[in-house]
Amino acid sequence: ATASHLYCPCLQARCMAPLRNGRVGAGLRLISEAWGLQCSCCSALTPVENGSKDVVADPDEDEDEEEDEEEHHEEEDQAGSEMQRSVPPPPPPPSNDRLLPPPEAPRQQQSVCRHFLRKGGCLYGDACKFSHGLPAEDASPAAAGDAEARRAWGGRRRVVRKSGKAGALRRFLLETFGEDTLRSGEGVLDIAGGNGELGFQLVNLNGIRTTVIDPRPLRVDRFVRKFQWGVYHDTAPLQRFNSEPAPSSSSSARAPGHLRAFLEEPLVDALRPEGGGQGRFAEVLLASFERALQVDWTTRGIETRAGDACDRDRGNVDADGGDTPDPAESSAASRAPPDVAEAERVLRGASCVVGLHPDQATGAALDLALALAVPCAVVPCCVYASEFPGRRLPSGAPVRSHEDLVAWLLAKDPRLREATLPFEGRNRVVYFRPDAPTDGQG
């Protein structure tokens, strides 16, 4: 290349095609003389010294171009073809004129798995089609810490999500004790089972006989609908815990058994060998049943009704969902005194004692399992320190917090163990296996 450049004096728009590889500067189209290009419209490329802006134009060539329009187009095509064949690639432009690469198209972010974000885990694991990471907007260290706190077990929440806690405990029972153990004897005792969700799942998903001991009528209509719609059989990773087939159009759901009473220490003591026999058991059981008919379970807790002792179930408030009482449980049969012999047989022959947030019955549930020497799993919740002022830790300190309550339960027997269940809120389970070693292992 020489030190001079060539300038097209006509500056017509049609000159842009053969000079498209030229450099634009100060409104002029300049090309290197070494390229050997010519303007197809005016054929007059005037040499211009490097850095000079003085131009000598040939006006006659403009007139020739205007007179022969068709010839211009033919020559333009020929010049373009000649340029493609003989022109080498242009040298790279100066760094200050170099074009920036086009911006990358924004990457479409994968949606974050709502179960992972909420709970910190997902049943599908690596097979999940959603992302198991923090969203991009939460990538800062402070936001990451907040997200971890939000999804950590037992993290503070304005409302604790309760859905799934019964299923989580059922799966823990199956993995820890096995179906054969749970099916033995008279089946599982669900202490303070509330609306009967855990018992309903054990009966209909595993065929395990279950009896709910709770002063409230059962409310299973919501679970019946979920069962008939196939909700319990929808999640593929959980189907290994379901030993009963999915419902068909002709199948019907079965309700767990129900003993309408409070499980308290006097009833547990009546079942011990030195408890006074069947007479004492019948006395305590019937008194507990009569008291169950005279209380309402409200949002403020248990309240005793004034006046008539009949069962006005429509006044009850269920904190877990507000279902109407089960029709069978609302009938006169639910107000009939229990069969004492049948109740004693079910309690003494239990295969396992379970309590999912059993409130005031927490200690009695564990004591019953230890007295019967059967497996047990209790998930404590509220402390009720004012109702049980006699509870003391091994150090002599009173039980005031949930941590104290768990420690107090574990101190009842050296074979007791502790685990954490995968749901939010109070999710620590204290469990017992009669064959467990007492040396702190297993």
Image (cartoon, rainbow, N blue to C red):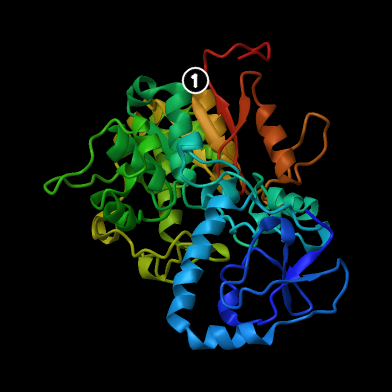
Whole-percent x and y of residue 332? 25, 59
Query: Quadrant of the rendered structure where residue 290 is?
Result: bottom left
Whole-percent x and y of residue 406? 68, 36
Which residue is nearer to you in this view: 143 or 46? 46
User: Which residue appears farthest toward the right when viewing the image?
Assistant: 51
Query: Quadrant of the rendered structure where residue 98 is?
Result: bottom right
Q: Residue at x 30, y 42 (%)?
A: 233
Q: Residue at x 50, y 35 (%)?
A: 126
Q: Is residue 412 above or below residue 311?
A: above
Q: Look at the numbered disc 1 and give the secondary structure of its residue.
A: loop
Q: Is residue 18 above or below residue 280?
A: below
Whole-percent x and y of residue 89? 65, 51
Kind of residue indicated by mark 1: Ala
Q: Residue at x 78, y 29 (%)?
A: 394
Q: Is residue 307 above or below residue 349?
A: below
- Residue 358 is left or right of residue 253, and the answer is right
Which residue is nearer to you in this view: 424 or 26? 26
- Residue 126 is left or right of residue 398, and the answer is left
Q: Residue at x 82, y 63 (%)?
A: 4
Q: Which residue is mark 1?
A: 373
